[in-house]
Image: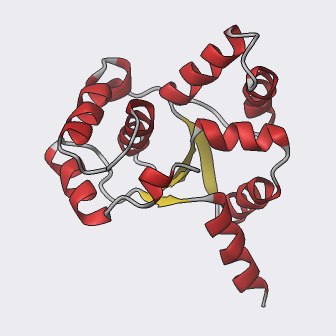
Amino acid sequence: MRLAALDTKFLLAYAAGEPDVEETLDYLRKNNFQIIITKSVVEQLQDLIRNKGHVAHLFALYAFWMCPQEGIFEPSNSYVDNGTSCAHAEKIREQGLIPDVTRIEAEILVEASCHRCDLLITFSEALLEAPNVPLNLALIENDMDAVTVAIASPKMIAERMKLLKQ
């Protein structure tokens, strides 16, 4: 089974009705991906839900409710559960492999790797522009399960779908 992970920004964009997001979900389903979210994404959504004054509060609430309805789940993983993935994410940040990446973005990437995802869908410019080879080598060195996590944006997926329809 092929896995694709979604980040928090993707889920918030889905809740807000962004058109490329719906096309991305269609693409993933057509290509037989099981869609997941990582522990960091769940925690970030829960933080937004608890913060009723935050501009994304209602979007987070809807996204959190929508995941099970759409067949999107958070699988368990020992690397994530015992905190190993957080330590590896911090190493990647310390090594400067992804310029301007936030802690949460690095954690989501490493968690996607721990889950053996083939694809991470994100709006993060830092992740989308990260050099693949050094990043994948760092994942190998840190004993991550999958070393070739492709990173794509909803816009990239929508453009790909348009090409396929021609």
Q: Where is residue 108 in the image (x, y as percent from the top left)?
A: 45, 37
Q: Residue at x 26, y 39 (%)?
A: 93
Please give left or right for residue 157 compared with residue 111 in the image: right
Quarter holding residue 53: top right
The answer to whether residue 118 shows anywhere in this view is no
Q: Residue at x 71, y 69 (%)?
A: 158
Quarter holding residue 65: top right
Q: Residue at x 26, y 55 (%)?
A: 135
Q: Residue at x 36, y 40 (%)?
A: 110
Q: Position of residue 20 (x, y in %)?
A: 76, 59
Quadrant for the C terminus, please.
bottom right
Q: Position of residue 62 (x, y in %)?
A: 81, 27
Q: Position of residue 114 (x, y in %)?
A: 36, 39
Residue toward you, 91 or 25: 91
Please give left or right for residue 37 compared with residue 40 in the image: right
Quarter holding residue 77: top left
Number of on-image labels? 0
Relative height, residue 95 to residue 134 (above, below): above
Residue toward you, 4 or 137: 137
Q: How is the image coloured?
A: secondary structure
The answer to whether residue 60 shows anywhere in this view is yes
Relative height, residue 2 to residue 156 (above, below): above
Relative height, residue 72 to residue 128 (above, below): above
Please give left or right for residue 79 compared with residue 20 in the image: left
